[in-house]
Structure formats: C-alpha cells, structure tokens
Image (cartoon, helix red, strand yellow):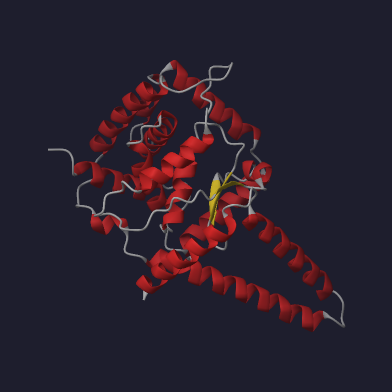
Amino acid sequence: MVSLFEKLFEFQKRIHQILFSWIPFSLGDLLYILLGILLIYLIIKLFRKKTRSNSLFKILIVLNIVYFIYQIFWGMLYFQTPIIAKLPKTEVTLEVRKALALEYLEKSKATRKLVNEDKNGVFVIKDLHAIQQEILNQQKTLPTFITQKKSSDTNSFKPSLFGKTMSFTGILGYYNPFTAEAQFNAELPSSYLPFTLSHESSHQLGFAREQEANFIGYLIGVHSKNPELRYSTEYFTLKSLLNSIVEDDEKFVKTALGNYSEEMKRDRLNERKFIAEHQGYLNDFFGFTNNLFLKSNQQEGAITYSYFIDLLVRYKSMYIK
C-alpha cells in the first residue's frame, strides 16, 4: 500500500514542479495565506447566528479536504521502510561518537578555509544558485542500497514569504507537499543555509521523516565538491555529534568547542547571535507544536538527534575495517 503512495508522490511532484517551479515566489506560501484568510472569514461568520451552522460546515469541509490531500500527497510517506533497516547493526557507543566528532571537527576546520567571509570574518555564501544546482546533482550519486528514488533536475527551491516570522519560530525551512516547493528562510546565517537546502531537497525526494532527511542531506553534502555545501554539512554533523555527547561528557564537548578554528568560532558566534535576536514566545510555541507534530508522525522530537546519529554511525561503520 505504501508503495502506491510513493508512486503517487513521484507523479504529483513531477507535475507540480512543471507547473510551479518557474514561478519566482513561493506559491505554496501564498496558498497558505489565502487558506488562512478563508478560515478567518468563516470563523468570523461563526459568531453570527444566521450563518453559524453553514460556516461550521464549510470549515469542516475545508479542513477535511486539506487533510485528505496532505495525507495522500505526503502523510503516508511516514510509513515507508525506515532507512535504518537498510544499514548494518552496530553499537552506537560514546567512544564511536567522540571519534566521529573529532573527525568532523578536523574536516570542518579544513573546509572552512575554502569558503568566503564577510567583513566581520563570518562565512558568507558566494553563489546560492550554485549550491542548489550542486544539491540536485548530488542527489544522483546517493547509494542505491539506501534509496532508488528518482532525482530531479528541476530547481524548486523557494525563499519563504514568511522568512522574518520563521526566524522567530526556529523553523529553518519546510517542504510544501501541495506545490512540491522546498521552502527556506533566506535570513538564516550562511552556516545554516546550504545544509537546510540539502535537508529540504531530501524531503523533495520523498523522505518524510525529519532525521532521515538530515541523513540524506548529509549524504548529499558530505562528498560535494562545493566547499560551501560541504562545510555546512560537516559543521551540522559536528554539532549533531556534540549535542549527542554533551550529556555524557560535557568536558569533551567544551574541549571540542575550544578547538574550533578561529573562523569556526566566528561562525558559531554569529549563529548564537542570530538565535538570541530571535528568541521569544513564538519560538517556544512553534518548538512545542513542532515536537507534537513530529511525535504524531512516529518521529522523535525536534531536539533529539539520536536517530540521525544512529544512521550516521551505522553508515560509517560500513567503511571502517
């Protein structure tokens, strides 16, 4: 049954990309705005006795239609065979995670020297379109034992119309299943952005689970010849590993952070500044609701990195003798 929805996903994605990819702005965001206006209008009519029953009926119809389309276009993909079932079993020990953290620390330090900086010495993206094209190219190189999903040459990356709001929610990007657009927050620090694009492109391939999209994003970026994409991927991997270690060995994490190159320290400071400037109740609210959404779709919460780390360790174990 799930394979049927996978085929349906590929079909609708191809059609939607043909129809919508050429539009220079996010059509999906515009549809959400129009849907929001419609619902607000119907909710207002709920307070009028004459139109209450009719408005309630229309609200239920609209919500059910949206939910039904979401499920057949996207929701059923959460029931695909997990990637972890395709990788060898291995013990995810603290020592293994530490070794990988040190490996990606050195890789990040080396790749960081290859990217551009702004006047403050912070990593800045030179060519965003080149990164997007590289992601599409790298999709074709994914290991066939992990996925045989069809890649696309169509660039459907779109900066979200809600960029400023997204900055206050902690949401870096999202995939719109109604238009097959990979939305991203264009205001993100450059250290976040390339991997965010890679992550959202993984959703475009049909990987619904968040941590699996992280893993596919990792595979897309880690071997890239584009240093901006590779650095963002290596840096994300390093941060994920350190986050998985900190509760077990805080001293190790502090030492690793101290061993960041000066360039990486500036990038980290820039990220922390961005986060601090966008903290607030909206961030807390969306963090809470996003956790509920993830768990309702049989996933871990947003702050949990263990599944991605499990996938990473299992994958890396295949190449360690």
| Residue 247 lies in quadrant | top left
Residue at 46% x, 18% y: name it.
Answer: 263
Residue 148 visible in the snapshot: yes
The x, y position of residue 84, in whole percent, is 28, 55
Judge whether 65 appears above or below 136 on screen.
below
Judge whether 260 appears above or below 238 on screen.
above
Asked whether, in this view, residue 9 is left or right of residue 276, the answer is: left
Of residues 201 and 130, the one nearer the viewer is 130
User: In the rendered picture of this protein, how many numbered marks are placed on residues?
Assistant: 0
- Point out the image quarter for the C terminus: top left
The x, y position of residue 185, in whole percent, is 59, 42
| Residue 280 lies in quadrant | top right
Residue at 58% x, 36% y: name it.
Answer: 188
The furthest residue to the left: 321
The x, y position of residue 165, in whole percent, is 67, 45
Residue at 61% x, 75% y: name it.
Answer: 65
The x, y position of residue 228, in whole percent, is 44, 30
- Point out the image quarter for the N terminus: bottom left
Residue 300 visible in the snapshot: no
Asked whether, in this view, residue 128 is left or right of residue 32, the answer is: left
Asked whether, in this view, residue 297 is left or right of residue 288, the answer is: left
Judge whether 159 appears above or below 37 on screen.
above
